Image (cartoon, rainbow, N blue to C red):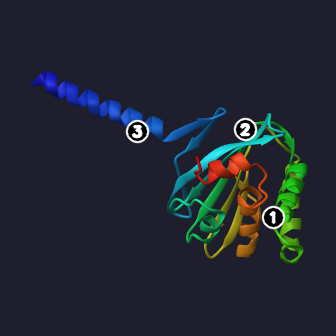
Amino acid sequence: MKFIKNLALAAIAGLLALNTLAATLDINGVKVEDGATVNGAKLQLNGAGTRHKGGIFKVYVAGLYLGKKAGTAEEVVNQPGPKRLSITMLRDIDAAELGKLMTRGMEDNMGKNEMSKLIPGLMRMSQIFSDQKKMVTGDNFMIEWIPGAGSVITVKGKVQGEPFKEPEFFTALMSIWLGSAPADWKLKDALLGVK
C-alpha cells in the first residue's frame, strides 16, 4: 500500500513539474510565459516568435496575449477585452530608430488618410522611443490595449505617459506585425498560431 501511495505521489509530482515546464517557452533564450494578466483579465499566449532582419539577424522575440485564441489580424483587433504584445530585444538597437521603424510599419499597412488622423499619436510614440536612447539585449517593451483607456506602451517596466485613446491607433500598431505587409511574415504566422 505504501508503495502505491509513493508511486501516486511521484506521479503527481511529475505532472506538476511537467505543468510548470509547459508554462514557459524558451525562444532564443527569452522566457515567454503561456499567460499574462492585463488590467485584471487573464490572457493566454496566442503565439510567439522571433523577428528576423534580412533572414539571418535575430532582432527580438514577440509574444501576443489575448482572452481567446485568434487566427487573423481582424480577430485580434476586434476581440473584446485587454490584449498585450510583448517584445524582448535580442540585440542592441538605437531606440529612436526602432520608433521610426514602427512608424514605417504602420505606414506600410495603412492608407495616407488613415495615417494622417494618427499623426499626434505617431509623434508621441516616436518621442517615447527617442527618450529611451538605446534598447539593449534583454530590454522589453509592451503594447497593451485596455478597454475604456486605450493603448498603453510600457518600456523597460515603466508605463510611458497617458494611454493613446483611439482604437485606430492600437489597430495601426498591430498592423506592424499582423497587417497585409508585416515586418516579418514568419513572425506574423507565429503570433497568429499558424503552423
Q: Distance between the residues labelled 1 and 2?
A: 28 Å
- Between disc 1 and disc 3, whose residue precedes? 3
* On screen, residue 58 above or below 82: above
Q: What element carries label 1?
A: helix
Mark 1 highlights which residue? 109
Residue at position x 75%, y 37% from top?
Answer: 90
| Amino acid type shown at disc 3 | Asn
Mark 3 highlights which residue? 19
Q: Nearer the viewer, residue 63 or 187?
A: 187
Mark 2 highlights which residue? 138
Point out the frontmost of discs 1 and 3: 1
Assign the N terminus to one quadrant of the image: top left
Residue at position x 74%, y 74% from top?
Answer: 168
Label 3 crowd bin: few (<14), some (14–19), many (20+), radius 10 Å: few
| Amino acid type shown at disc 2 | Gly
Point out the frontmost of discs 2 and 3: 3
- Between disc 1 and disc 2, whose residue precedes? 1
* On screen, residue 116 above or below 134: below
Residue 64: mark: none
Judged left or right of residue 153, residue 76 is: left
Point out the frontmost of discs 1 and 2: 1
Q: Distance between the residues labelled 2 and 3?
A: 26 Å
| Amino acid type shown at disc 1 | Asn
